[in-house]
Image (cartoon, rainbow, N blue to C red):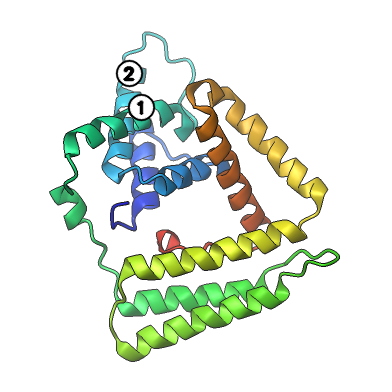
Amino acid sequence: MENYFNYFTEIEEHFQKRRAGILLLSTLDWALIETWKSAGVPLDAVLRGIDDAFDKYDQRPSKSKKVNSLAYCSQAVLAAAEDMKEAAVGTASEDEIKREPAFDAAQIVTFLRSNADKLMLGKLPSRAGFSPRELVAEEAQSLREIAQTIETSGKVPRLEDLERRLTVLEEKLFAVLTAATDDDVLLQVKAEADRDIAPYRRNMTAGQVEQLHKQYLHKRIMERFGVPRLSLFYMH
């Protein structure tokens, strides 16, 4: 995966630009971006795929319906990713190197401490045998300790290592939240995912649909309980 943490922002802004209008991305859209990020789809491939999809849309004689979801571009994005993979022959592009974010230590410290505070304020679920409260407190403390270490050193840490650590924390958090969530709530969210994905299912493989379901559930559960995303990709 390219070392670039403005992934979400760039995709959102480019989609809105091509659509020629502000449209808040839906849960499905954000889940789709998550699947691309997790699969290591380069940012350039996503932007190129969005362009290709809208270029074809613009050539249509009738445009009675506006493009209202990033999922419309999913096939074009995957095609662009394959094309770039074949052309790259294992080398990083100059654009990827230039895109190293200009995060400073203070920004990262603020982000980590803010998320620690938000974790402690989350409205957490609970059920017999499963209570996320202890884990949440431990993770909030971990974030504060990381922040203190960075602040003391005054240096930006290796971002890939920090991102890997934050990903582990978030995966543990999501697992315990899911275990503590009422079954009816989980069924409701999964039904929402089925409904939102249905119009685009024919353009995705079974594996892509399954991954999109997982990311959709992940995002909705975290939102439902007011728990922040810990990844550096959400720093902006």
Query: Is residue 227 visible in the rendered structure shown here?
Result: no
Three-letter code, disc 1? Ala
Q: Dot 1, crowdedness within 10 Å: few (<14), some or many (≥20)?
A: many
Residue under the point 63% across and 47% down = 217
Q: Is residue 106 left or right of residue 140?
A: left
Where is residue 154, by image quadrant?
Answer: bottom left
Query: Which-is-in-front pick, marks 2 and 1?
Result: 1
Q: Which residue occupies the foreground of this view, 74 or 22?
A: 74
Q: Which residue occupies the foreground of this view, 12 or 146?
A: 146
* Residue 91, numbered circle: none
Q: Quadrant of the C terminus?
A: bottom left
Residue under the point 27% across and 34% down = 48
Residue designated by label 2: 56
Where is residue 33, by image quadrant?
Answer: top left
Q: Image height check: is 34 above or below 179?
A: above
Residue furthest out toward the right: 128
Where does residue 87 sit, x and y in percent of width and height? 18, 34
Q: Earlier in the sequence, mark 2 or mark 1?
A: 2
Residue under the point 76% across and 42% down = 187
Where is residue 171, by image quadrant?
Answer: bottom right
Q: Image height check: is 97 above or below 196?
A: below
Where does residue 203 sit, x and y in percent of width and height? 48, 22
Residue designated by label 1: 76
Q: Image height check: is 177 above or below 42?
A: below
How many numbered marks are there? 2
Which secondary structure, mark 1? Answer: helix
Is the residue under label 1 in contact with that under label 2 (CB below 8 Å)? yes
Where does residue 212 sit, x and y in percent of width and height? 54, 39
